[in-house]
Image: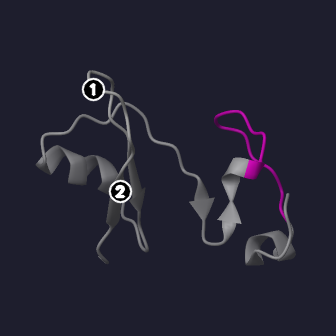
Amino acid sequence: VKPANVFPEKTPPGFTSYLSIVLKEGKKRQIRRMCKTKDLVVLDLYRIRIGKLDLRNFDLLEGKYKVVTEEQVLGNLNP
């Protein structure tokens, strides 16, 4: 498994902390397992990108999907 890049997000003291974790290659529940080894509790996970496809531009409810074009997957167009 390739190493992950972890970036802490700025949060006010006393509030839940956020981490941005970038994986080049992921295994099942890898982020949860990584956090558990450091005694961190994962409350929620949000996938924001798959390859070059930025998922933040899609207005999707949890568990729903959208058909995308080859150009969108390759990063040439927005959704």
Q: Is residue 45 left or right of residue 58?
A: left
Q: Position of residue 51 (x, y in %)?
A: 61, 71
Q: Is residue 22 left or right of residue 31?
A: right
Q: Position of residue 69 (x, y in %)?
A: 87, 69
The front one of 72 and 11 is 11
The front one of 10 and 18 is 10
Identify the mark at residue 65; answer none if there is no mark.
none
Q: Residue at x 83, y 57 (%)?
A: 67
Gap in Å between the C-alphas at discs 2 and 1? Answer: 17 Å
Q: Is residue 49 left or right of residue 11?
A: right
Q: Nearer the viewer, mark 2 or mark 1?
A: 1
Provide the residue span drawn in magenta: 57-68
Q: Position of residue 79 (x, y in %)?
A: 85, 57
Q: Residue at x 86, y 70 (%)?
A: 77
Q: Which residue is mark 2?
A: 7
- Position of 7 relative to 5 (above/below): above
Q: For residue 49, which quarter of the picture?
A: bottom right
The amino acid beneath tag 1 is Pro
The amino acid beneath tag 2 is Phe
